[in-house]
Image (spheres, rainbow, N blue to C red):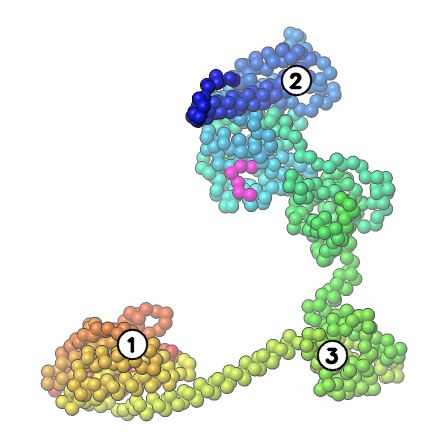
Amino acid sequence: MSEPVVPVESGAAPDLVELARVVAQQRVEMDRLREQAATSAVVERAKGVVMALTGCSADAAGETLLQRAKAARRTLLEECWITLGRTATAQPGTDASPAGPVRDADGATAGLPEADPTQEPFAPDDVAEALGRLGRALVHADTPQALARCLRDHLGQDLGADSVMVYARRLGGGLELIGHAGLDERLAAQWRQVPPFSGVAVLDALRAGEPRWLEDFTEDSARYPLIGEPPERWLSRAWLPVPAAEGPEVCIGVLRGRSGPFTPRDRAHLRGVVRLCAGRLRTFTARAEPTADAPPEGIRALFAALPVAALLLTPLRGPSGEPEDFRIDAATEQAADVLGGTGGDPVGRRLREFWPDLDDAPVGRGCLDALATGETYVSEPFAQQEMVDSVAELSTYSVRVTRLKDALVVTWVRHASSDRQEQRLADLQRLGNLGWANWNLATDEASWSSQVFSILDRDPADGPVPLAGLPGLAVSDDRSSLGLAIENLIREGRPFDLPFRVHGTRGVRHLRLVAEAVADMHGTPVDVHGFVQDLTARRRAELALVESERAILTQHDVLQSERTLVARLQNALLPLPERAVNLAGLRVEVAYLPAQAGIHVGGDWFSAIELPDGDALFVVGDVAGHGVDAVATMAQLRFTAKGMVITGSSLTGALARLNTLLLHSRDPHGTATMVLARYRPAERRLVWAQAGHTPPLLLRDGEVSFLRRPSGMLLGATTTPRFEEAECRLEPGDRVLLYTDGLVERPPENIDVGLARLAGAVAAHPGDEMGSLKTLLESMLEEERRDDVCVLDIRMPKER
């Protein structure tokens, strides 16, 4: 293309919009020319196939393709892709051989693959148009991965496909995922290799050469292992083998998130898609792999003579340069057993055909390690199934991998029963941190296992210590006892089991020596054997436990002393009446029960006194915490509250002053709850106020209710509290309970549950006789109390 050059005046800026338009036109033209060139390459390749099969000229081949496209209602590009896909590698003697044209009775050329209209009906116009678009798009797909993305873009619009997978058959019958779109890499890696097992939908489709339509998720999940995490991600699937002359080797999977069948239109569309892909897949360059040159004669002779299972491997590297697999270039006869007894010569095949999970197998890890470091890799013994006389047996092997330039030599060593026994003995010594030792008293020879040298921090090059020299290794305090035990063993053959200590590079070690003697026919000890065990970790744990127990006992004594002190202090400050008392015409019973869980005494308290004017004052409080501090705060609040009310303070005024007192106490974070109640006998009025406390309970005529709480905040919670008073007129026979929260709380249940339980217990035990409070408490409290309980049981006598 050419554009007229517009002169630009000196100093003037060029028209940027016009330049951008020119550039855009040139890019569009370049893309068109590229697509035309790629399309021409496909057409010319298809014409070459027709010319090779029929022997006609290039013009006649082009005309043949054009006529076939018109007859099948396809585009020329589609027909070229289908022609390339149907063409297999020609074998001599077949009617596809390019040796020359074969003509039928009418003189028409034979050998060109013909469409079978009875097998594949003509697609609807919209499907044909979609396939035409796909044929043009396939020109730009140059890898299986790009083809999968192209198919997903195409089928996502026309069929609602969410994902596409492309599998290729590999040697041994397994499958490899060569392209995918719509899958995350973790799921793709999990399903990259599919072993040749039965019951897999994609393998089933390839073996039958027919599509597999998975349209009922419940039924399909029972028949096949479905791909997906979870499999419900795709509710309908189709697996379509790509046609090829010698049988399908590639299968394309289309996965949809929606359920439901594939309609006849969908099926015709997908069959057309795989026919187009057959030609494109055939044009891809095969993965570059090292050529499997035959190993030299010397190597073949060496592997033929080796008496063990061995392989010569060449790494197959991917585009990143990292090894993805290994090719078997030579193998011994015994290698077939460790390879699973699959039969046939393994030379030339890939290692993943025998170990699909090669990355997790010892041989795979060994190969990668030897390639990376260049050092010989020797694995720990592992169990592996092998075929012996066509029977699967589990044997123990170790694998050894040695790098030779760019190749690897892998050998397997099978462990006999004696080898396994020796390995178990070594494992036992290592896990038990012990080792065996033997002393020949006649020759003064000694032998130790390697573990004994490790336990005693002794260099094996220095050799074992004679039996008589062992006491010299012990600390000075243990030498005499160890020497005496050894002397009794040598003279009298008396066995011993003795602990002793040694100094080492890791500090003092606590060891145990167990030894016994073997005597000759005269009863004289001639040989001593036994074992040495390192007990340092156990001994340190024992010492730590002793110290912990000692600390616990000391702490327990301190706490018990504190409990005794607090209990005495509490009894002195809070004396309990031995019987019910009468105050201002009311009968009052008091109960105080300390907590049984733990050893601390709490801060629950009460007051019940008659005031100078004849009124009665009732107080129940609960200080947060336990111990001496709680008792001290309790005493301070108890005596201050009584003093304030006696000197004329109102109930709310007393609570406000007590709040200030608590805020300025030695524990600024201390809190308390309280109920103050004043009974005026002349009016039979009970006036009360509360600070964050549970409400009083009223029993009247057999009915239980809780008095409505006036406003009141927890003491010590704020500098600006607000308190209010409430009142209740008592009737003859009424019963009022003031109590602390230990009576109703049972963590972790809600406090309302405990209040309801109290109401039920009072209703069930309304007795007016002496000792009825004890019966109520027994019905309310559990066997082990976690908190103190304080109760004032106030009764108005019945009128006579």
* Residue occupying image coordinates x 41% and y 80%: 597
Q: Which residue is mark 1?
A: 716
Circles 3 and 2 in contact, beta carbons < 8 Å: no
Corner quadrant of residue 11 = top left
**How many numbered callouts?**
3
Circles 1 and 2 in contact, beta carbons < 8 Å: no
> Disc 3 or 1, which lies upstream in sequence?
3
Q: Which residue is mark 3?
A: 513
Q: At numbered mark 1, what does the secondary structure look like: helix, strand or loop?
A: loop
Q: At numbered mark 3, what does the secondary structure look like: helix, strand or loop?
A: strand
Foreground mark, 3 or 2? 2
Q: At numbered mark 2, what does the secondary structure look like: helix, strand or loop?
A: helix
Corner quadrant of residue 729 = bottom left
Q: Position of residue 34 (x, y in %)?
A: 56, 23
Up-down relation of residue 312 to residue 523 (above or below): above
* Residue occupying image coordinates x 50% and y 86%: 554
